[in-house]
Image (tube, grey):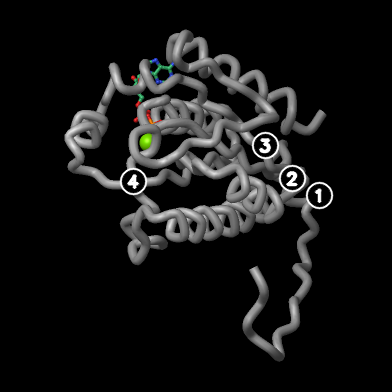
Amino acid sequence: MAVKSTNITEVAHRIDIQARWQANGHRGAVLWFTGLSGAGKTTLALELENRLFNKGFNVYVLDGDNVRHGLSSDLGFSHSDRTENIRRIGEVAALFADAGAIVITAFISPYQSDREQARQAYPEGFREIFIDADLEVCERRDPKGLYEKARKGEIPDFTGISAPYEAPSNPDLTVDSGDLTVDESLQILMDYVEETFVLK
Ligand SMILES: Nc1ncnc2c1ncn2[C@@H]1O[C@H](COP(=O)(O)OP(=O)(O)O)[C@@H](O)[C@H]1O
Ligand SMILES: [Mg+2]
């Protein structure tokens, strides 16, 4: 997005990023979970956060419903509002990562172009992680009863029913959360984080 303000100059921090990483024992990262409602993004993000925290990681989850109560409380679910929501999350996640954290974002983020834009906010440490359960599985789980409501026409623009979901064409990691157990899915995620972001 173009910058509207004039007369702004970026300042440089006096703590370099390597020092932050050394203090944490790992690099900063944005683990961008994407998938249908009910695929397991929140379940896996919160338990991954828990496990990483207990191992001493500086880690934080940004989750869809929470963000929509605050930062994005002015936005709905139209295409343009979703795009703006993801833009904000991408920028906030990048700030956390720049501060040295491993940020796990749990948003449907149905549009490939929005996810690409989020990647541009923190290209070096961004990983697109496809939490992959298909519509049939998600609808059967329906943990919040939303599919049932959407099928009755009570929720407009519901991803998978009346709004599109563009699956990642080239994700950095796919977790087959439709077939695996929660524990198996978490093991894949833990291994990935430890291999990719822990300082050797
Ligand atoms: N492998 C798995 N990974 C994540 N969740 C799973 C898995 N298997 C079954 N589930 C169940 O699927 C549901 C996913 O819901 P949720 O995490 O809220 O999804 P989302 O945040 O993607 O909308 C939960 O009830 C969870 O217990
Ligand atoms: Mg969720």
N-terminal of the pair, mark 4 or mark 2, is 2
For the residues labelled 4 and 2, the Cα–Cα distance comes to 41 Å
Marker disc for residue 127:
3
N-terminal of the pair, mark 1 or mark 4, is 1
Secondary structure under tag 4 reads loop
| Pointers 1 and 3 in contact (C-beta within 8 Å) | no
Report if the beta carbon of the residue with label 4 is closer than 8 angstroms to ligand 1.
no
Residue type (three-letter) at the residue carrying disc 3: Arg
Q: From the viewer's perspective, is 164 left or right of 138?
A: right
For the residues labelled 1 and 3, the Cα–Cα distance comes to 20 Å
Residue type (three-letter) at the residue carrying disc 2: Trp
N-terminal of the pair, mark 4 or mark 3, is 3
Residue type (three-letter) at the residue carrying disc 4: Asp
Q: Which residue is mark 2?
A: 21
Secondary structure under tag 3 reads strand
Q: Which residue is mark 1?
A: 18
For the residues labelled 2 and 3, the Cα–Cα distance comes to 18 Å
For the residues labelled 1 and 4, the Cα–Cα distance comes to 43 Å
Q: Nearer the viewer, residue 77 or 124?
A: 77
The residue lying at 42 percent from left, 25 percent from top is 39
Quick one: which residue is furthest to the bottom in this view?
7
Q: Position of residue 40 (x, y in %)?
A: 41, 25
Judged from the image, the quadrant occupied by ligand 2 is top left
Q: Which residue is mark 4?
A: 157
Secondary structure under tag 2 reads helix
Closer to us: mark 1 or mark 3?
A: 3
